[in-house]
Image (tube, rainbow, N blue to C red):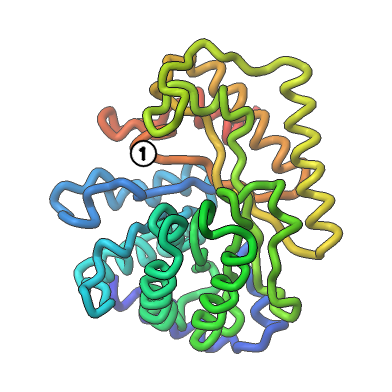
Amino acid sequence: MKLLRLFAFFLAALVGVSATAASAQAPSLHRGVNVLGYDPIWTDASRGRFKQSYFGAIHAAGFDFIRVNLQAFRHMKPTGELDETWLKRLDWVVDNATAAGLSVIVDEHDFELCSNDPETCRIALANFWKQVAPRYRAAPPTVMFELLNEPHAKLDADHWNALLVDMLAIVRRSNPTRMVVIGPTQWNSIDQLPTLKLPEADRNILVTFHYYEPFQFTHQGASWTNMVAVHGITWGSEADRARLTHDFAKVAAWSKRTGRPVLLGEFGAYDKSGTPVELRAAYTNAVAREAERNGFPWAYWQFDSDFVVYDVTKDQWVKPLLDALIPPAR
C-alpha cells in the first residue's frame, strides 16, 4: 500500500502546480458520506469497527467521496507533534479510499475545543496543519483539506475569519493549489454565509454548509441537545418542503453572487429517536435531491455511530436510507 501511495503521489506531482491546472484537476464531487469520526480504530486498530473492505463497498454503493472526521488534538504530544501511529492510520485511510476510487476530505473535527477556547485552538490547529498538509503535498487532487468543522460560540464571524486566513496560509505553503473546504461560523450555518470572508484571489476553496433543519425533527431525542425528551415530531408537509426549497435557493444565490462553489457537508436525521426509518428516509431523500437540483455535492452524516446508513453489527447497509440517498436505477 505504501508503494501504491508513493506511485499515486508521483503521478500527481507530474501534473504541474499552476492554479489553472489545479482547477482543471479539481475532483468532481457528487455523493459522499462522513466516516470514522467516532471509531476506536484511531486509538486501537484491533478494536476498529471500520473494515478495509468498506472503502470498496462505499464506492460500489454509488458514493464518490468520503469526509474523514478527525479529532486529532487528543493524539498530539505536549510538544504539538502528532502521534506517528495515528498519522499512519490516516495514511491507511487516504491510501485505501484513493485505491477504491473515492475522493477524500480530511476534516479536522475538534470544533468544540476550538469554539470554546480559540487561543488554545489556534496553537493546536496550526500544529495539525503544519504536519498534515506537507505530509500530503504530493497527494492526488482528489485529497482535500477541511480547515475546521463547525466553528461557533467564541469563534464568531470576526474571530473565525481571522483564524481561517492564518490556517489557510499554513496549508498554502506546501499545497498552493489544493482544494480546501471552509464553512461559516455558527456550525456552518447558511445564515452566516454572508459573514464568511475568504481571500479573494484564492479560488481553490470549496465552501461548506451543514443542514439539519428543522432541528426539532432531525435531532429529537438526541442526548447532546436540549431535545432529549422530544419525540413524535414529523416531517413532510408542504410547508416543510417549501422551507427546504427556500433555504437551498438562498445558498445557491449566495454561491452565484460570490462565484464560490458549495458543498453540503452534513445532513441527516437522528436514528435513535424512535422516528420511523421511512420518515427519516423521506427527509434524507428530499434534502439530497434538493442539493442536487442546486448543483451542491453532498456528504451524509454518517456511515457509522449514529444517524447510520451502514449497520456494522450486521455488516449491511440500512437499505431505506441508502435508497433515499442513492435511488436504485430503474
Q: Which residue is mark 1?
A: 304
Is residue 232 positioned above or below 65 on the image? above
Is residue 22 positioned above or below 93 on the image? below
Secondary element type, mark 1: loop
Report how many numbered discs are placed on residues in the image.
Answer: 1
Residue at 23% from the left image edge and 52% from the top image edge:
41
Q: Nearer the viewer, residue 71 or 12?
A: 71
**Amino acid type, mark 1:** Asp
Picture coordinates of residue 163, whole percent (x, y): 54, 72
Picture coordinates of residue 168, whole percent (x, y): 56, 76
Picture coordinates of residue 18, whole percent (x, y): 66, 88
Is residue 312 positioned above or below 20 on the image? above
Residue at 30% from the left image edge and 78% from the top image edge:
3
Picture coordinates of residue 239, whole percent (x, y): 77, 19
Q: Nearer the viewer, residue 326 or 79?
A: 79
Residue 1 occupies quadrant: bottom left
Q: Nearer the viewer, residue 47 or 164?
A: 164
